[in-house]
Image (cartoon, rainbow, N blue to C red):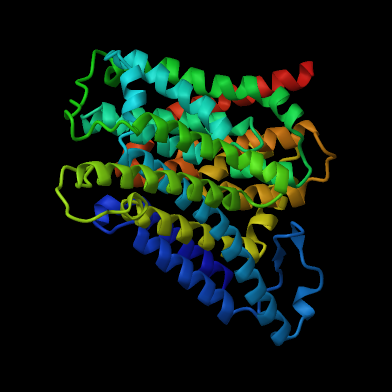
Amino acid sequence: METLIILIFIVGYLAIALEHNLKLDKLIPALAMMAILWALVAFGIDSFPNWFDSGAHKLIEGFSSFSSEEKHHLLEETLLHHLGKTAEILFFLLGAMTIVEIIDYFDGFATFKNYIVTKNKKKLLWIFTALAFILSAIIDNLTATIVLITILQKIIDDKNTRLWFAGLIIIAANAGGAWSPIGDVTTTMLWIGKKVTTAKLIEYLVIPALLCMVVPTFIASFMKPFQGEIDTIIVKEDKTTNKYGPIMLYLGLGAIMFVPIFKTVTHLPPYVGMMLSLSVVGVFAEIYSRSQFNISHVVDTDGDDSEGFHSPVHKSLGKIEMPSVLFFFGILMAVAALESLGMLFLGAESLKTIIPNTDVVVMLLGVGSAIVDNVPLVAASMGMFQEPVDSPLWHFVAFAAGTGGSMLIIGSAAGVVAMGMEKIDFFWYFKKISWLAAIGFVVGSIAFMGMRAIL
C-alpha cells in the first residue's frame, strides 16, 4: 500500500509539472491526488506499521498494536489537525490577497508606480528584489510576493519580461523570509517550537540570506531579459486615478505589518490578526467608496457606470485567484498524507544514517523542500534532531528550508502564488530560474558555514 501511495504522489506531481503539456489545470491533479491519497490511507490504516504525530514531531509508539477503531479515530484526528493547519495558511493567504485587491481597487499601487521613474530593466530588477527581500521579512514572503507582482503587473506590460522579474522576486522573497521569525511559515514553526530566537536567527542568517538574493540578482542583471528599457503601462486619466489610493496603500500595508505584532501580543495564529486587519481595511474601503458614491452618484473603478453601490470588499473577493488557493490546499494536504504515515520522518532518519554529516543532510532537506513542501520537512527535522535552542543546526534548517524551495516554482508558497498570478509554466521556471536559485542557495549555505565558524 505504501508503494502505491508513493506512486500516486509521483504521478500527481508529474501531472502538475506537465500542466501545459497535458492542457490540464494543475488544480485538478492536486485535488485528485490529495483525495486519493487520504482514501488509500483510510483503506489501509490497519496494515500501516507507523503513524506520525505532527504535534509532537515523532512517531507514535505502539501504533501497530492499536485496535482498528483506535486507528480510525486517530486518522480522523490527524486529518482534522492537518485541515486546521492548512486552513490557517489558506485564510491568512485569502486575507492578504483581499487586502491587496482592495488596495488595487482604489488604484493604490499607482503610488509605488509613481515612485519608480526609471525604465532601465537592470535598475528595476534591483529595486524589485531589494523590496522583496525587505518586505518579506516584515510581512512574510507570501504576502510580499503578492504585493510586488501586483505592482509589477502595473508597470511592465510585456508578459515574458514580467515572468523573468517574477522569478527573481520569488528568489528574493524566499531569501528575505528566511532570516525573520515571521518571514516564512517554517521559520515561524521553529520560532514557536522554541528552536530559535529572533536575535540569533537574524544574527546567523541575515548575511547568508542577503547573499542568496544578491548573487542571483547580480548574475541575472547581465542577462538579456534585463538589458535595455521597458515600455511602462500608460495610466488612464481621471477614471483610474483615485484620491484615496495612497491612503489605502499605506493603510493596507500597515494592516499587514500589524499582523506579527498582533501575534506576538496575543499568541494567536497569524490568520486571526490578518482577519482583523482585513476588517479594518474593509471598513475604510466601504467608507471611502460610499463617499465617492454620494458625491458622484456613480461607483466605478473599472470605468463601468453603475446606478447602485458596489462594495469594494465584495469586488475584491471576486478577483482572488481561488484556483491557486485550492491548488495550495491540495498540495499541502497530499503531503500531509505522506507525513502522517511517517514516510517523511523515516526518510529523513535514513538520510541521517546514510550521511552522518549534518550539513549535507540539511542541504539535502533544502533541496527536498523544492520538491515536497518545506513545512512537513521542517516538522520531520524537528523530530530528527535534539539540539538545544539556538543551535546553529536549527538556523541552517531555517535557511535551507526557506531558500531551497526557490529551486522549483511549486517549492514554496511564494512560488505557488506567483505561478497562479502570472501563469508561470513549471518547465519555463525550471529552465530559466532554477539554476539561479540553486547558485543563491549554495552561496548562502557556504556563507552560513563561514558565519557559524566565526560566531
Task: Identify the residue at horizontal 25%, vertical 27% (top origin).
Answer: 156
Residue 417 position, x and y percent, is 41, 45
Residue 355 position, x and y percent, is 71, 41
Residue 68 vs 323, above or below: the answer is below
Residue 36 vs 292, above or below: the answer is below
Instruction: Please state which of residues 269 and 84 is positioned toward the viewer in this rendering.
Output: 269
Residue 289 vs 39, above or below: the answer is above
Task: Identify the residue at horizontal 77%, vertical 34% (top origin).
Answer: 197
Instruction: Please state which of residues 4 and 116 is positioned toward the viewer in this rendering.
Output: 116
Left or right: 17 in relation to 332: left
Q: Quadrant of residue 426?
A: top left
Residue 440 visible at all: yes
Left or right: 367 in relation to 97: right
Q: Quadrant of residue 239?
A: top left
Residue 251 position, x and y percent, is 47, 35
Task: Identify the residue at horizontal 71%, vertical 69% (top origin).
Answer: 50
Left or right: 253 in relation to 191: left
Split into 4 quadrants, where in the image is the N terminus? bottom right
Residue 424 visible at all: no
Instruction: Please state which of residues 314 and 365 is positioned toward the viewer in this rendering.
Output: 314
Task: Identify the residue at horizontal 35%, vertical 27% (top origin).
Answer: 165
Split into 4 quadrants, where in the image is the C terminus? top right
Instruction: Please state which of residues 340 and 132 is positioned toward the viewer in this rendering.
Output: 132
* Residue placed furthest toward the right: 388
Residue 345 vs 166, above or below: the answer is below
Q: Count the numbered circles shown.
A: 0
Residue 336 position, x and y percent, is 58, 61
